[in-house]
Image (cartoon, rainbow, N blue to C red):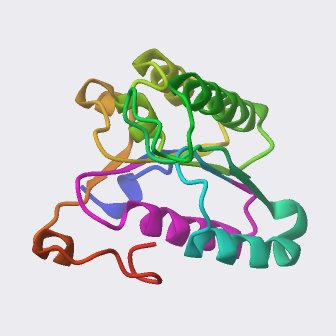
Amino acid sequence: MAFEDFQQKESVVIVYTGDSKGKTSASIGLMCRALGTEWRVAYIQFIKYWEVGEHTFITAILPVFKQKLTFYKGGKGFYQAGDMSAKNVSDDEHVAAARTTYNFALDCATSGSYDLVICDELSNAVHDGLLERADLERLLKSCAKNTSLCVTGRNFPNELIHLTDIVTNMTKVKHHFDDKFLANKGIDY
């Protein structure tokens, strides 16, 4: 097939999943590329509430990109049913935060106001039961025709891959955590 036989899609659905590090980092790179081409981007986080390097970076560049970048931090922390160790956050509070964040993401994705909507750790929220698989499916199917969507997180449902255009599985070959070393600031978070 010759190159001239290829067509370009108006928008795409991208997934960064897998058990290894790099999903959020890849989405930050995608955000940078999109902003560098004058796109309007919404970057929405579903899990992280504590201050991490990407929050500092995004907050610092917000004034530079003014109306081109929206940042929404909606998570309440890592979730495990019945475990209130994450800042004494109840299951109901986790679910409510995920639902509010999801509604914000759905509004961004369906509005036609953004060229790219990134939902960081949305797959985690679905896998952990904070949101339903049907919610993820609705988002994947509902984007405005000119809006690309990126979903990150572990355990993206295989049954929904047919609704995507690009899926990258981050596979760990080696990570120092397995040798009982903690995550490094600036590298892992």
For this view, does 41 lie left or right of residue 89? Answer: right
| Residue 186 on image: x %, y % | 47, 83
| Residue 80 on image: x %, y % | 37, 35
Vertical placement of 189 versus 122: above or below?
Answer: below
Question: Is residue 181 on the magenta stretch?
Answer: no
Vertical placement of 60 versus 171: above or below?
Answer: below
Question: Is residue 16 on the magenta stretch?
Answer: yes
For this view, does 72 lie left or right of residue 125? Answer: right
**Which residue is more in the foreground, 37 or 52?**
52
| Residue 109 on image: x %, y % | 67, 36
Which residue is at 25% across, 60% downward?
170
**Which residue is more in the foreground, 56 or 87?**
87
**Which residue is more in the foreground, 161 or 24?**
24
Quadrant, the N terminus: bottom left
In this picture, which residue range is highlighted in magenta?
15-42
Tell me if residue 139 can be seen: yes
Tell me if residue 10 can be seen: no
In this rendering, the count of numbered labels is 0
Which residue is at 69% across, 27% downward?
103
Vertical placement of 169 versus 145: above or below?
Answer: below
Which residue is at 44% across, 46% downward?
78
Give the quadrant of residue 185: bottom left
| Residue 38 on image: x %, y % | 75, 68
Which residue is at 45% across, 18% downward?
132
